[in-house]
Image: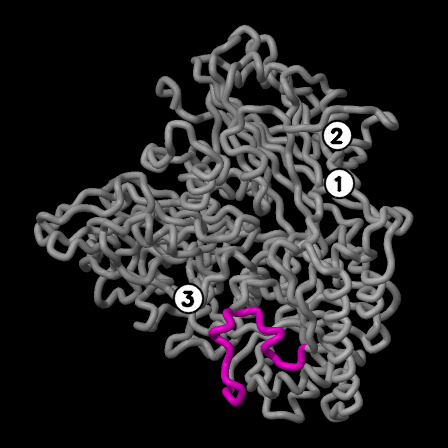
Amino acid sequence: MANGEPRGLKHFFFRDSGERFDFTSPRSGGSRVIVPTRDRDAHARELERTLTLAIATAEQQLNARDVTLEGGQRGFYLEFQLPLEQRDMLDKLEDRRGADHIEVVSVRMPEADQAGNIAATVFVPESKKSSYLKKFEQYRTEETRTGKPKHQPLVASIDSVNLATQARSLFTDDPLLFPANEQDAWWEVWLRDGGRAILERAADRQIIEIRDHFVSFAEREVLLVRATPIALGRILANSDAIAELRLARDTPAVFLEMGGRDQRDWALNLADRVIPPENNAPAVCVLDSGSTRQHPLISVALNAEDQQAWHPEWLVEDTSNQWRGHGTQMSGLSLYGDLTPQLVGDGELKLNHRLETIKILPDRGNNTPDMYAYITASAVSAADINAANRKRTFCLAVTSDGPNWSGRPTSWSAKIDDLAYGDGDDQRLFMVSAGNISTDYPAVEYLQQNDLSAIENPAQAWNALTVGAITEKCTITDPTFAGWDIMAPSGDLSPLSRTSCAWQGEWPIKPDIVMEGGNRGVDPETVHGDHIDDLSLLTTHHRINERHFNVSGDTSAATALASRMAAQIYADNDDLWPETVRALIVHSAEWTPAMLSHLPAHPKAADKWLLLRRYGYGVPNLERALRSLHSDVTLVFEGSLQPFKREDGRVKTQDMVFHALPWPKATLENLDAANVEMRVTLSYFVEPNPGERGWTKRHRYSSHGLRFDVQRPLENRDQFMRRINSAAREEDEAVPVGAGLEGWTIGPTLRSRGSIHSDIWEGAAIDLANSNGIAVYPVGGWWREKKDLERTNREVRYALIVTLRAKADIDLYTEILAEIPVEAEINIET
């Protein structure tokens, strides 16, 4: 707080205050295609030879189809091998013309291929069986107007082509996990349009078990199937139903730490001081092992009707030793945070948010391999039906311990994105744990182990706030551990927190934020990390006949704290959108000195990349998320736009929105070279379209993207609009296109990952005086590339948050208030 001033000033809130303009991106051309060097004639003839053999075999396969299994469009699957650097050619393998489409159904990227190549499996309708042969021949014998071989970029990029006849060709998991031919296994079967009826019919005629539950996306349905690879291969040979195969994951990894003493008297004392929340107060909905409602600190905020279980035969209470009271731990932290400071107080404690719990983990054993995507969706639906009008934050601290996905979506993570997007009308806010390293390790490997341990499923979800863990807990008072040291320095990463440092570059920045998750002690004899109660968070215990308190930590505890923060923001202003609450949390986050100490004096992009992939945007601050200061003022814009439109059979960009920033221009000019800071955060939800098809332009995961750009110091509004928007230009007008305002901490390239973008500009006040306009505009996504799915006329919402902070002691707040038009919809109560 500047000069001790409390944060007592409401942010400025605006809804639909921006001006919409037709938008056309000035960016064009893209990257130049590099074509592999080939012996043109020899390469074409070899491809023609192998493809001719493949088609001949496919014709025999079609003629020998089993009428009891046959279904869908007659056709066959081809598998193409391409070098990684020719990834952009994947879209050219498709042909969407006419009624019969050639479709890329799945892609195995290099890390899943022993040869290090891309393997693309394509479904070819029988009516188009000669399509590739024609292209190969034209490549060999014909030239374009520029004298280059026809279809050269595509054909020269193909290493080989073969008929795909086995389930392995559609397997996009780790190839080392592929079961033996006669081995029964549970599979996630990703189906093409109309494939479910075909699969169900085929299952009746083979020894195949299908679970009733399924999840749906724009182009795929995902079912859980128990079968051998041979049985799935027969379906592959006799129908067009299957697009992709993965192994089912049936056990969540929940890392629990226990300890503490019975503190019944303390619990009752605190319960007597609690003022319960209203029934219609915002809630944290904990998806976990249930909760012990009889606990006096939980019963005050958890109604019996708000305690549910996913399976109708399960008890709603947290009764199982298997999960060691994890759900009750999350319940206590979601309501109170770390209980220690609450217990030592003596005043009233008003709860402004409630608790809901839905048990998604069974009391005995593991879930039968019902997909966690379906379980999560069912649990969310149950909460919505039970209290339809209640604002809630979903807290999910259950993660999968399967092979890491390098950031690529799964059915579970994609379903969370789908639930958050809510078809554009019923958006939801999710907090998801980043997952924990499963075992302690030598202290000298701290941070190295974290950077190598990838964030777990489903925490790669774009629309969720993924929560990692840091720690400020550095004091050991228990004499049993005399001589022990701490592993993590104060303000640095919690020792078991996972990161996305090992992910490929195109995936979102994860974790988004980090919160307290406790520390590890270092045994002086073994120099290994180990649990110490002193370095954990105090929370509620599930067996109150044994004790009332337990300890918790790691990313589970951090996720509960983040969920609590979201509920507190809702309680302060329940009119906010989920996108806005998410944005406020990220916008309030800062890196600690310990985090920044890992940066060199002059950090490069790779250094910043590591900082983001390890800590996200840092540690959020509730006071900063809720209130402004006179010298530190936040403006919150909630708006919408239509990213695309269909015109003359083509899909084009449609809207951009311009927001005028009510900067106190004269004051900033008078400050001259004095340092000021501007932070911008843009948050929106995307509609997912999962499936391993290479994540190329056409098969992007996200429905759309949004970006922001800020007016440069020497630009007026018209110049700014013409620079970023071709639709604002006169025909053939030449306008320099380049980066926007310079001086960003992260920069437009690094911050553009995922569906939330946050960055900080710092510089001279006079440079910001004229930078009083900000634009939000769309970039590509599958809504644009897949016009047949009819998403082109959809509106999307976004939250844009802008903070102006002066290092000098100056009243920016009053001056900004004076610049706001009277008719603007704002909230300025103090």
Quarter of the image for residue 152 reads bottom right
Q: Quadrant of the N terminus?
A: top left
Q: Which residue is mark 1?
A: 29
In the rendered image, the vertical position of residue 61 relative to residue 26, given as above or below: below
Residue under the image location 50 percent in, 10 percent down? 673
Between residue 795 and residue 67, name the one nearer to us: 67
Q: Secondary structure at mark 2?
A: strand
Residue under the image location 77 percent in, 24 percent down? 735
Q: Indicate the position of residue 806 as horizontal and vertical percent values.
A: 47, 18
Residue closest to the far top: 670
Q: Secondary structure at mark 3?
A: loop
Q: Which residue is mark 2?
A: 19
Between residue 581 and residue 241, name the one nearer to us: 241
Alpha-carbon span between mark 2 and mark 1: 29 Å
Q: Secondary structure at mark 1?
A: loop
Between residue 99 and residue 545, name the one nearer to us: 99
Q: Is residue 172 magenta?
A: yes
Alpha-carbon span between mark 1 and mark 3: 42 Å
Q: Is residue 708 left or right of residue 653?
A: left
Q: Which residue is mark 3?
A: 401
In the rendered image, the vertical position of residue 128 relative to residue 587, given as above or below: below
Q: Amino acid at mark 1?
A: Gly
Of callouts 2 and 3, which one flags the residue occurring earlier in the amino acid sequence?
2
In the rendered image, the vertical position of residue 549 relative to residue 115, given as above or below: above
Quarter of the image for residue 238 reads bottom right
Q: How dense is the environment of label 3, judged by Cα within 10 Å: few (below 14), some, or many (20 and up)? A: some
Q: Indicate the position of residue 467 as horizontal and vertical percent values.
A: 43, 50
Asked if disc 2 and disc 1 are in contact, CB closer than 8 Å, the reply is no
Q: Which residues are magenta?
A: 164-183
Residue 726: in sight, yes or no?
Answer: yes
Q: Main secondary structure of the magenta part?
A: loop
Q: How dense is the environment of label 1, judged by Cα within 10 Å: few (below 14), some, or many (20 and up)? A: few
